Image (spheres, grey):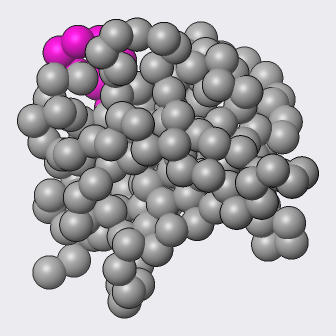
Amino acid sequence: MRNVPHPVVVLTAASPSTSPPSPLGLAISSFNTVTLDPPTISFNIRHPSRTLSAIRDDDGKFRIHFLSPRPMSAEIAAAFTNGNHEGAFEVRRRLVRLDMNAGVVGRAEGKEGGFTSRAARILDPHVTASMSCVVEKEVEVGDHVIVVAKVSDVMREQELKEPFLMYVNGEYVLEG
């Protein structure tokens, strides 16, 4: 399966009442769309996971970031592969600007389906789009959890002219 290309996204979650807020998150190479109507995605996450616990503590809310296929995007993704500890947080803070108080409101605020996510938003030109999501279902399989989530909000940061960052055979697939 190492030879099968996978999209890479960065997931961020709200830190459970830490002060200052910590940029919890991880890079995911198991991201998939499930349905377009309603917009639903899935991914796999190792269990136990500090990020998964943070998602659960925030009523299932999290944010997905799509990266351009550039060397800096690979660095951003790599910064979210080293766990959730102070050393990893410091690397993330030095590498990208993080809006730790993003509080993006779902498009149906005050109505069924609307929400406010406390997950950090990565503010970087290599993030081409992001989405706010809320967990619909979890399925435990071995030491992983398959997460199925509803997409509540999509923000396109720039015109999408190329594919997103991919990972295959232990390396990021880069353009240009």
Residue at position x 59%, y 40% in the image: 117
Farthest residue toward the left?
Answer: 94
Q: Give coordinates of residue 12: x percent, y percent.
A: 46, 37
Q: Nearer the viewer, residue 2 or 140?
A: 140
* Residue 168 can be seen in this image: no
Does residue 106 belong to the magenta stretch? no
Left or right: where does residue 140 sit relative to residue 95? right
Left or right, 94 with respect to 106, comes to left
Please state which of residues 130 and 32 is positioned toward the viewer in this rendering. 130
Q: Nearer the viewer, residue 123 or 145?
A: 123
103 relative position to 20: left or right:
right
Which of the image's four quarters has the C terminus? bottom left
Where residue 159 sits, quadrant-wise, is bottom left
Q: Would you place residue 3 above or below residue 135 in this image? A: below
Q: Main secondary structure of the magenta part?
A: loop
Residue at (49, 36) in percent of width and height: 119
Residue 141 vertical position relative to residue 19 in the rendered view, above or below: below
Residue pictured at 65% horizontal, 25% vertical: 58
Relative image position of residue 137 (x, y in whole percent):
85, 36
Q: Where is residue 140 drawn, in percent x and y?
A: 79, 23
Residue 145 against residue 173 in the figure, above or below: above
| Number of marks | 0
- 106 lies above or below 38: above
Give the magenta range.
81-88
